[in-house]
């Protein structure tokens, strides 16, 4: 195997679509990074899993932060209020903050998914994945995604671990000066620091990566959505993020799909274990 980089950062998101936390090391188990996407909010009225992919309704979820320590997850609202994940007052406070009745779930109910605004103008007019139907809601084209969540018994959009490389982000920054391609916009689990600059992870699809002692099968390049353009923490809204990815890295993520703007890859780990910042990343030849 050939070394292609090292683990630069590790991120975990205990509640789907909220901000998460940076870690020095983490265990990987049957559900990916320990505690990652362990919970999500559920819209009691519509029956959809809450996702900032519908930003006009749920963009404020990105302003909330979830962190886990010693087996306990706590959620902090922008108001400064903080609650344990099992505190009944949490969903009351979140419902008031978001203006809709929400509950907490630890897996997607059968038949559920999330709503996603389909921004054709930022994707070179590409249609929805696998030609799935869309509808117009409040002037926005909308699709329903996340069908694999219930089938897989988790809250992941697709793969259990999401990797982004510094080589890709640096290349985008050189191609589109003035656009901030901060890794946090893409919500990766692992940021891999690569010596080479370019869309290096495109070539990893279908291959095996060894990170530390854990082997991963890279399954698909990650199509990007409107979430990459949204404001949170110290990052401002910028639709040029997605527009630039479309201009420079519009590829076919997997067989049977059209070409979409992609950054990063999904991977499934083949063994359990621990990953730490600084560990080597090797690619099978």
Image (cartoon, grey):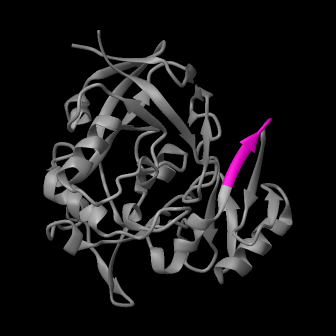
**Could you tell whether 129 is left or right of 215 in the image?**
left
Q: Residue at 38% of width from left, 29% of height from top? A: 193
Q: Nearer the viewer, residue 82 or 118?
A: 82
- Tell whether position 138 is magenta: no
Which residue in the rendered view is the most extreme toward the bottom?
A: 138
The front one of 6 and 68 is: 6
Q: Closer to the camera, 190 or 126?
A: 190
Count of numbered labels shown in the rendering? 0
Residue 18 image offset from top left, x and y in percent: 59, 59
Q: Is residue 52 above or below residue 57?
A: above
Image location of residue 88, percent across then percent down? 84, 65
- Which part of the image, by quadrant, shows the N terminus? top left
Residue name at image x 78 percent, y 55 percent: 85
Q: Is residue 26 above or below residue 215?
A: below
Q: Is residue 67 visible?
A: yes
Against 38, is 128 above or below?
A: below
Q: In this rendering, would 86 be left or right of 167?
A: right
Residue located 48% across and 18% down the image: 279
Query: In the rendered structure, which segment of residues is drawn in magenta?
Result: 66-70
Residue at (59% x, 56% y) in the render = 19
Quadrant hosting residue 163: top left
The main secondary structure of the magenta stretch is: strand
Horizontally, is 182 left or right of 205 in the view? right
Look at the image and tell me whether residue 31 can be seen: no
Q: Position of residue 74 (x, y in %)?
A: 77, 52
> How far from the left and from the top, in percent, is residue 174?
21, 48
Q: Residue furthest front?
A: 178
Q: Quadrant of the C terminus?
A: top left
């Amino acid at each position: 195997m050939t070394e292609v980089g090292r683990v630069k950062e590790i991120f975990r998101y205990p509640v789907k679509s909220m901000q998460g936390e940076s870690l020095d090391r983490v265990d990987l188990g049957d559900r990916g990074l320990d505690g990652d996407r362990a919970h999500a909010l559920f819209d009691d009225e519509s029956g959809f899993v809450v996702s900032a992919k519908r930003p006009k309704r749920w963009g404020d979820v990105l302003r909330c932060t979830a962190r886990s320590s010693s087996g306990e997850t706590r959620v902090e609202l922008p108001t400064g209020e903080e609650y344990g994940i099992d505190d009944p007052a949490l969903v009351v406070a979140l419902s008031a903050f978001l203006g809709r009745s929400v509950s907490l779930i630890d897996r997607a109910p059968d038949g559920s998914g999330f709503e996603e605004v389909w921004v054709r103008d930022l994707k070179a007019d590409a249609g929805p994945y696998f030609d799935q139907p869309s509808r117009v809601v409040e002037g926005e084209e909308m699709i329903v995604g996340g069908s694999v969540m219930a089938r897989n018994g988790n809250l992941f959009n697709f793969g259990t671990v999401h990797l982004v490389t510094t080589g890709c982000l640096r290349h985008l920054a050189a191609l589109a000066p003035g656009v901030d391609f901060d890794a946090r916009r893409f919500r990766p689990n692992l940021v891999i620091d690569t010596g080479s600059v370019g869309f290096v992870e495109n070539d990893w699809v279908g291959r095996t990566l060894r990170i530390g002692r854990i082997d991963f099968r890279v399954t698909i390049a990650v199509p990007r959505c409107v979430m990459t353009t949204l404001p949170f923490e110290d990052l401002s809204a910028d639709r040029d993020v997605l527009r630039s990815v479309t201009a420079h890295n519009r590829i076919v993520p997997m067989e049977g799909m059209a070409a979409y703007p992609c950054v990063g890859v999904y991977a499934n780990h083949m063994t359990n274990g621990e990953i730490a910042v600084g560990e080597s990343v090797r690619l099978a030849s």
